[in-house]
Amino acid sequence: QVQLVESGGGSVQAGGSLRLSCAAYRYSISGYCMVWFRQASGKEREKVATIATGYGSTIYPTSVKGRFSISLDNAKNTLYLQMNSLKPEDTAMYYCAAELGYCYSSMTARSFSTWGQGTQVTVSS
């Protein structure tokens, strides 16, 4: 099973940017559905970006569309999340997740069997 390790979180002021990384080990992430989730204190885990590694297609919810960008570096076996124009409501623990196979819009956190440990993002106003 692929193993995932996130990095790149931190504290920024509103309007700032961060880039999160999710390094994969043991196996290639080619052929996986890769997703960034976030979970704010007291809230449910929500998807913020999805990429189908086989096709490169991406999906974003309205809350982050135009501000967040998910990408892959196949040579480094690493997933990224570029976050721009950050808002205080983006404050959360961010996780990358992987599931072998296709991406479906109906996939939830329960659909993913492999998770990283998470990286904290804090945005101050």
Image (cartoon, rainbow, N blue to C red):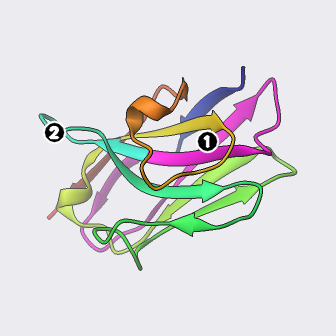
Horizontal side, residue 79 vs residue 30: left or right: left
**Amino acid type of the residue that numbered disc 1 sits on in the rendered structure:** Cys
| Residue 39 tag number | none
**Secondary structure type for disc 1:** strand
Q: Is residue 90 left or right of residue 18?
A: left
Location of residue 38 by image quarter: top left
- Left or right relative to 95: residue 22: right
Give the number of the mark in front: 2 or 1: 2
Q: Determine whether 66 is above or below 105 in the image.
A: below
Q: Residue at x 87, y 51 (%)?
A: 75
x, y percentage for residue 27?
82, 29
What residue appears at the point 77 percent right and 56 percent down from the top-left corner? 54
Hey, which quadrant is residue 58 in on the image? bottom right
Whole-percent x, y for residue 49 in the image: 47, 58
Residue at the outermost right position: 75
**Residue 27 shown in magenta:** yes
> Does the magenta portion include 8?
no
Position of the N terminus by quadrant: top right
Name the kind of residue labelled 2 in the image: Lys
Q: Nearer the viewer, residue 15 or 6?
A: 6
Residues in magenta?
Answer: 10-36
Marks 2 and 1 close (CB-CB < 8 Å)? no
- The residue carrying mark 1 is 22
Dot 1 alpha-carbon crowd within 10 angstroms: few under 14, some 14 to 19, many 20 or more: many
Q: Which mark is residue 43?
A: 2
